[in-house]
Image: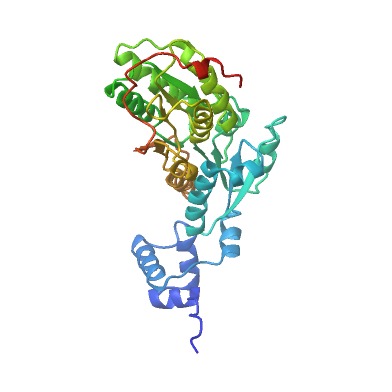
Amino acid sequence: MRTAKKSPTIREVAEAAGVSISTVSNVLYGKQGFYSQETAQRVWAVVEQLGYRPNRLARSLARRRTFTIGVVAERHLGFVSHNAYFGLILDGILHKATEHEYQVKIVRVPADNPEKAMDYIVDGSVDGVVLVALFADNPVLRLMEKSDVPTVVAGSIPPTVKLPCVDVEDIAATYQAVRWLIELGHRRIGIITGDMRQWSARRREQGYLMALREAGIEPNAAWRFEGDYRIESGEVGIVQLLRTDPRPTAVVCGNDKMAIGALHVLRELGVRVPEDISLIGFDDSEESAFISPALTTFRQPMFDIGLKAAELLLQQIETGTRISHKLLLPAELVVRQTVAPPPPSYGSFSSASSASR
């Protein structure tokens, strides 16, 4: 019967490196002035070779740390845990945290009193925090900017907020989408944006507007609807856009849920996708590949966003330095079945005109 491999001890590290136990401890916990650079390199080489991991409690006492990362989210826990966007970011954070033997705790931001989240953050319960997709006007952003707690944002933030962040290249993605639609022959391109309190929604609209104006196409306010990322707002938004005359021949949506809502309504009204109208989402959610027709969308590297955010946070915690690094990761266009050249006739649909949703 195979027995579990015994973890190496600090005594074994000391013996292999030819130093005292106290020297190994000083090297591991960064106590300068007690050893030479050569000794430190030798100790770390043995630590790596033996796979030694210092006891969590001892590390915590030595460094006065909790070895816990707080993940601060705008919405309630149920929404976070059941939302693919947040779930994948959390997976990335957990992966990196586990790799460095840190725990992760989720901190809810109360809608009526966001400052309450700060009580938990600054009381020493966590060593640092990742802020996930907070609204641009959330006071927690400014409070964390002024605090001494290491902080990284996973998601978009206003350029005036001087916090490190990891996000997707929103502007480049929607710019690419609209340029592609224009190359296919579309000139009447609508947009169903996300909640404009989210900086990512503003950035995606910015890319949309840039592409239109670069092509000499004047944006039409009637072809714009501000949604809130829910399926229902996509349903309401597409009805509003279809009631315009002339109507758009293509619509870019701020996320997949709104695009799926739009697709439901278009199917009910007998408007064919993509023959009559093209549709593009954003996220590459699981549903986007299985609806009919399958949704053309942008795949966000959400796991990588969480991974990199945790990496930047741990870098600050371990080095004791503050950074203001902003890292943008590319979104990948996933071409499926909801985009085609505009229809030969640009006339209005009577079914859309009579929609009563």
Nearer to us in this view, 39 or 315: 315
Q: Tell me the quarter of the picture where residue 247 sits.
A: top left
Residue at 30%, 26% in the rendered image:
180
Can residue 141 be seen?
yes
Could you say where residue 162 lies in the image, as x and y percent from the top left?
Answer: 48, 29
Q: Tell me the quarter of the picture where residue 341 sits.
A: top left
Residue at 54%, 43% in the rendered image:
86
Query: In the visual, does 46 lie left or right of 255?
Result: left
- Image quadrant holding the C terminus, namely top right
Query: In the visual, does 178 lie left or right of 30?
Result: left
Can residue 230 be seen?
no
**Vertical side of 84 occupied by 197: above or below:** above
Could you say where residue 34 lies in the image, as x and y percent from the top left?
Answer: 45, 61
Residue at 38%, 71% in the rendered image:
46
**Vertical side of 178 occupied by 81: above or below:** below
The residue lying furthest to the bottom in this view is 1
Could you say where residue 288 lies in the image, as x and y percent from the top left?
Answer: 46, 41
